[in-house]
């Protein structure tokens, strides 16, 4: 068994690019109802995760310097607000023990290949569903 059983591939995952604007990010997160979203560069390498808090801090700091206009959100890039140390990825060959530990600490875990390229995410929900299915199967055996 490996993490591929739980992973949602990049093609089924919403993400932002480092050169996306603050406005793009807010719109995508609102559309999907996310509180955090992975960020990659144009080559596909994982750069970090941006959160609602990152957006809020950026809006507040901009408003403190000068009056805010909605068009200003098109001038700020995701790479300027991202916390690169938040929500670190795991490699595709991570042990299930490490993956499960990370899922207890993060709502989703970004997954990269051996080159650091973003290939998908593992969500806490998918892991919990898997564990519930195992529990149900074992309960029926008793």
Image (cartoon, rainbow, N blue to C red):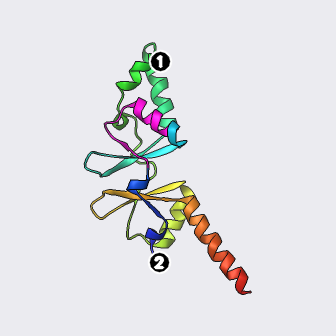
- Left or right: where does residue 131 sit relative to residue 15? right
Mark 2 or mark 1: which comes first in sequence?
2
Q: Residue at x 39, y 20 (%)?
A: 72
What mark, if any, has residue 64 been given in the picture?
Answer: 1
Which residue is at 46% across, 24% downward?
61
Spatial CA distance of label 2 from label 1 is 51 Å
SS at badge 2: loop
Q: Is residue 142 left or right of residue 1?
A: right
Q: Is residue 80 above or below residue 113?
A: above
User: In the image, what residue occupies the spot 34% across and 36% down?
Assistant: 20
Residue at image coords 66%, 80%: 137
Q: Is residue 128 above or below residue 61?
A: below
- Discs 2/1, front: 2
Give how far across and how far down residue 132 sits, in percent.
65, 70
Residue 16 inside the magenta-drawn segment: yes
Check disc 1 and report its element: helix, strand or loop. Answer: helix
* Picture disc at residue 31: none
Taking the view exactly as shown, the residue that stands out farthest to the top is: 67
Where 78 sits versus 75, above or below? below
Q: Position of residue 113 (x, y in %)?
A: 32, 63
Neighbor class of circle 2 (other Cα within 10 Å; few <14, some 14-19, many 20+) is few
Return the x and y of residue 139 as percentages of the image width and height: 72, 80
Span highlighted in magenta in the image? 14-29
Q: In the drawing, what numbered circle is on residue 1?
A: 2
């Amino acid at each position: 068994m490996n993490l591929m059983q739980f992973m949602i591939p990049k093609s089924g995952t919403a993400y932002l690019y480092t050169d996306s604007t603050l406005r793009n990010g807010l719109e995508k997160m609102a559309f999907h109802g996310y509180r955090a979203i992975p960020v990659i560069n144009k080559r596909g390498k994982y750069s970090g995760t941006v959160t609602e808090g990152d957006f809020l801090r950026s809006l507040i700091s901009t408003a403190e310097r000068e009056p805010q206009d909605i068009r200003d959100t098109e001038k700020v890039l995701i790479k300027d607000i991202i916390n690169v140390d938040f929500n670190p990825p795991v490699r595709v060959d991570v042990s299930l023990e490490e993956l499960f530990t990370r899922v207890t600490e993060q709502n989703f875990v970004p997954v990269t290949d051996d080159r650091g390229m973003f290939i998908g995410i593992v969500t806490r929900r998918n892991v919990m569903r898997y564990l519930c299915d195992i529990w149900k199967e074992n309960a029926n055996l008793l």
